[in-house]
Image (cartoon, rainbow, N blue to C red):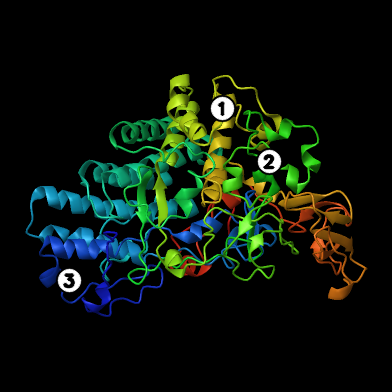
């Protein structure tokens, strides 16, 4: 049985008094018994802190939607921005401060507990960790934001109506919070608890983010401070590597070890998992469902698929005619992580959900505005509801720590072969892939993705491959948007994601057995009645699709109407730099507090 942390609801325990009508800062009113009767014991502090936990879950498996990794038919903020004329009047989310007040209320009062100084420091560290997490999200979205480290009283107009604080100041406060937490939060054996290694993993992650963001975003004027953060990222990651006791999950089975991290009902004690959200059927159900597979809203892109190397370590895009390879050819001699992330020819479907073809060898189900590729990462191919309910989600993997260390060292031009061997090559070894060596041959396709990288470091060739490895290892786990933003690579999102290639209308094998499964006909033709459909060599009716292009009454869209790659969207729009790396403060809040100015071209 998993030792799952149970979160208690403070609302039923503490009466929430009515407070303030402040329109600019969402208020979490102080409680009528909070100061006098609640913060007295370690149990009180622990109960309060548990309610600050809000770590990601299975929604992360569609977190790459609307990037170059995947497309979505759903609505996302960035997707809408790129095809419209956004302003502070139309982008009105994100300026919510309720959680900060909850955190600062704890930090203002935890010291009343009658516990040891060590425990007080531990709980202060936890509070400051969650405050850092809150402000990291705000800085990523707005850059300059007002900093508050105590609860604002209703009569403190100076605080309520203050201007933005500079990014450099706020980030300094964030780093101070994280470093205090890293030094004082203790080990905690309960599954899913925040401990010193969780804090350090987030510290390393954010230090890399901020360091690379400053390095590649000249509009901030903070390039000269980037290396301080990159050094922190490298040093913190190395501390985790040397002293955290973590290791990649590697049983010597490169065709399964990677995938097993994403469909497990028991990540407790897994050597690779630094933090997980744990579930147990009938106690704390996971909420998993199969939306990441098939044609619901999200489907992975051809561009991501083409980033995976050949099994000999060479770029797939070096292969002659790679742009026009058929679906059944794209998975031949590829990095094994590809077939543990994408549904591959011959994949046996058990969990059929809403897929009308039923179980058995899966035939790629095609539909308008989807790539034809289907996502396996995070998909659980089972029919057992108790399995679905008990799934654990790996919030922090040691694999990310290795990638952080390698990237930071390359950005600092300090990377060695030893560094590669203890990081990137550990990941490649788990996948059964050849090692990366210093001075790799530059892949022109990868170089074209990141045109600004040459000016960043003398080790740019190595960094290109580290970025590839990060994309592949963390694919479809929700990292890609942040990566593109910090690398000043938002223009990659303008490229319309494409799907499976078809050279012409006609019959195609999609399962890899040499027997045709589907037939593409012109969009002007009619799909025959069931009894009139053509049969394949097994006597099974072919699946018919009417092919055309956008604006035509077709079942699927092909680039050239009757040939080419599956098209997912007619126009992605434009990514305006540097403006779209940030968001405006919603107009309603600026109206209430005119000291809040807009920056980076927003109005």
Residue 569 position within the rendered picture, expressed as x and y whole percent measured from the top left: 74, 59
Residue designated by label 2:
306
Q: Mark 2 vs mark 3: which is more N-terminal?
A: 3
Check disc 2: other Cα within 10 Å, few if <14, some if 14-19, many if 20+: some
Residue 221 visible: no
Is disc 2 placed on a helix, strand or loop?
Answer: loop
Considering only vertical position in the picture, is 545 above or below 489? Answer: below
Q: Of the numbered discs in the image, which one, if any, rests on residue 520? A: none
* Mark pair 1, 2: CA separation: 18 Å
Considering only vertical position in the picture, is 229 above or below 197? Answer: above
Considering only vertical position in the picture, is 346 above or below 58? Answer: above
Residue designated by label 1:
434
Q: Nearer the viewer, mark 2 or mark 3?
A: 2
Q: Is residue 550 left or right of residue 438?
A: right
Which residue is nearer to you in this view: 516 or 370? 516
Check disc 1: other Cα within 10 Å, few if <14, some if 14-19, many if 20+: some
Q: Is residue 105 left or right of residue 461?
A: left
Q: Mark 1 vs mark 3: which is more N-terminal?
A: 3
Residue sitting at 64 percent across and 45 percent down?
Answer: 304
Residue designated by label 3:
34
Q: Mark 1 vs mark 2: which is more N-terminal?
A: 2
Which residue is nearer to you in this view: 323 or 131? 323
Residue 442 position within the rendered picture, expressed as x and y whole percent measured from the top left: 65, 25
Residue sitting at 21 percent across and 76 percent down?
Answer: 13
- CB under 8 Å between discs 1 and 2: no
Q: Nearer the viewer, mark 1 or mark 2?
A: 1
Location of the N terminus by quadrant is bottom left
Is disc 3 placed on a helix, strand or loop?
Answer: helix
Residue 235, quarter of picture: top left
Location of the C terminus by quadrant is bottom right
């Amino acid at each position: 049985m998993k030792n799952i942390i149970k979160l208690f609801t403070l609302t039923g325990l503490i009466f929430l008094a009515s407070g303030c009508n402040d329109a600019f800062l969402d208020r979490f009113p102080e409680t009528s018994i909070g100061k006098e009767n609640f913060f007295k014991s370690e149990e009180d502090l622990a109960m309060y802190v548990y309610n600050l936990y809000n770590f990601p879950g299975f929604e992360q498996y569609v977190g790459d939607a609307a990037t170059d990794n995947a497309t979505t038919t759903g609505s996302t903020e960035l997707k809408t921005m790129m095809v419209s004329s956004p302003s502070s009047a139309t982008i009105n989310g994100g300026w919510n401060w309720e959680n900060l007040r909850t955190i600062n209320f704890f930090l203002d009062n935890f010291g009343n507990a009658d516990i040891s100084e060590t425990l007080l420091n531990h709980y202060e560290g936890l509070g400051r960790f969650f405050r850092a997490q809150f402000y990291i999200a705000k800085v990523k979205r707005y850059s300059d934001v007002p900093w508050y480290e105590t609860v604002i009283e209703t009569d403190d107009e100076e605080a309520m109506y203050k201007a933005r604080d500079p990014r450099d100041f706020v980030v300094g406060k964030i780093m101070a919070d994280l470093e205090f937490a890293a030094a004082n939060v203790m080990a905690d054996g309960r599954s899913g608890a925040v401990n010193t290694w969780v804090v350090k993993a987030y510290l390393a992650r954010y230090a890399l983010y901020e360091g690379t963001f400053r390095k590649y975003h000249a509009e901030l004027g903070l390039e000269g401070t980037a290396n301080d953060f990159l050094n922190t990222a490298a040093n913190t990651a190395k501390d985790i590597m040397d002293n955290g006791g973590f290791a990649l999950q590697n049983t010597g089975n490169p065709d399964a070890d990677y995938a097993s991290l994403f469909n497990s009902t028991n990540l407790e004690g897994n050597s690779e998992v630094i933090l997980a959200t744990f579930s147990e059927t009938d106690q704390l159900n996971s909420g998993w469902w199969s939306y990441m597979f098939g044609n619901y809203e999200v489907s992975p892109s051809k561009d991501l698929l083409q980033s995976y190397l050949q099994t000999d370590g060479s770029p797939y895009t070096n292969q002659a005619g790679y742009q026009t390879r058929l679906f059944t050819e794209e998975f031949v001699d590829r990095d094994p992580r590809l077939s543990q992330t994408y549904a591959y020819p011959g994949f046996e479907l058990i969990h059929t959900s809403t897929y009308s073809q039923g179980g058995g060898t899966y035939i790629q189900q095609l539909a308008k505005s989807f790539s034809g590729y289907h996502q396996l990462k995070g998909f659980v191919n089972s029919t057992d509801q108790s399995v679905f309910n008990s799934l654990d989600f790996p919030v922090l993997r040691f694999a990310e720590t290795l990638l952080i260390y390698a990237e930071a060292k390359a950005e600092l031009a300090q990377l060695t072969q030893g560094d590669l061997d203890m990081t990137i090559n550990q990941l490649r070894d788990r996948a059964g892939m050849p090692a990366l060596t210093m001075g790799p041959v530059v892949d022109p396709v990868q170089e074209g993705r990141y045109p600004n990288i040459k000016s960043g470091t003398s080790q740019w060739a190595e960094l290109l491959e580290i970025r590839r490895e990060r994309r592949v290892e963390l694919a479809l786990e929700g990292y890609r948007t942040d990566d593109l933003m910090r690398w000043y690579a938002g223009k990659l999102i303008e490229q319309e994601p494409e799907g499976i290639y078809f050279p012409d209308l006609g019959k195609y094998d999609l399962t890899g057995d040499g027997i045709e499964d589907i037939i593409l006909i012109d969009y002007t033709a009619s799909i025959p009645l069931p009894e009139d459909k053509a049969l394949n060599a097994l006597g099974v009716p072919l699946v018919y699709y009417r092919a055309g292009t956008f604006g035509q009454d077709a079942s699927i869209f092909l680039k050239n109407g009757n040939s080419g790659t599956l098209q997912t969207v007619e126009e992605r729009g434009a990514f305006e730099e540097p403006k779209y790396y940030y968001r405006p403060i919603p107009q309603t809040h600026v109206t209430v507090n005119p000291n809040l100015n807009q920056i980076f071209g927003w109005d």
